[in-house]
Each structure stands twice: as structure tokens, then as C-alpha cells.
Image (cartoon, rainbow, N blue to C red):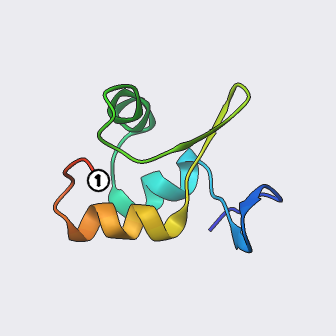
């Protein structure tokens, strides 16, 4: 899993490649779900990163928006 030095607290954030590997979603679909507010993401300037814990929660919730 790819990680970056950007982190929330002590948890490293991942990129779309890691989300693609974990979910099987294509990259374009990942970014579309982020734009729709369905897939949880962290915006770091122009970059979009993902908290692995939130992605796992999103998967457990059946891919629904997290409140």
C-alpha cells in the first residue's frame, strides 16, 4: 500500500492507487465518488488523499456516504 508523509494525527494517508487496489474501483470512478461526496477523502491543496481507516469504514458501510 502506498503511503505519504501527510497524515492525520499519526495515521499515514494513502493515494488513489491504494484505494483502487483495495476496492477494485477504477481511478476515474474513485475521483467521481469523491466529487459526489460519497467516498471520504482529504484534500491537500490540489492533491486528494485517503485515510485508510475511513476507506475501510466506507467499505463496511456498503459504499454509502459517511456522516
Q: Name the residue located 46 percent from the left edge and 60 percent from the top edge.
A: 21
Which residue is more in the foreground, 46 or 22? 46
Q: Name the residue located 42 percent from the left edge and 48 percent from the top edge.
A: 40
- Report x, y in % for residue 15: 61, 50
Q: Name the residue located 16 percent from the left edge and 61 percent from the top edge.
A: 62
Q: Secondary structure at mark 1?
A: loop
Please say if 47 is above or below 18.
above
Residue labelled with disc 1 = 66
Query: Hey, which residue is sitting farthest right in the picture?
Result: 5
Query: Hey, which residue is sitting farthest front in the picture?
Result: 67
60 relative to 23 in the view: left or right: left
Which residue is more in the foreground, 34 or 15? 34
9 relative to 23 in the view: left or right: right
- Report x, y in % for residue 33: 33, 34
For mark 1, does the 10 Å Cα neighbourhood hold few (<14), some (14 to 19), or many (20 or more) residues? few
Q: Which image quarter is the N terminus in? A: bottom right
Mark count = 1
Please say if 41 is above or below 10.
above
- Report x, y in % for residue 42: 58, 44
Please say if 19 is above or below 25.
below
62 relative to 65 in the view: left or right: left
Which residue is more in the foreground, 25 or 43? 43
Q: Name the residue located 25 percent from the left edge and 47 percent from the top edge.
A: 65
Amino acid at each position: 500500500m502506498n503511503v505519504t508523509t501527510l497524515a492525520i494525527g499519526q495515521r499515514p494517508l494513502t493515494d488513489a492507487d491504494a484505494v483502487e487496489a483495495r476496492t477494485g474501483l477504477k481511478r476515474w470512478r474513485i475521483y467521481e465518488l469523491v466529487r459526489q461526496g460519497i467516498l471520504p477523502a482529504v484534500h491537500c491543496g490540489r492533491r486528494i488523499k485517503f485515510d485508510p481507516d475511513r476507506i475501510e469504514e466506507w467499505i463496511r458501510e456498503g459504499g454509502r456516504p459517511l456522516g
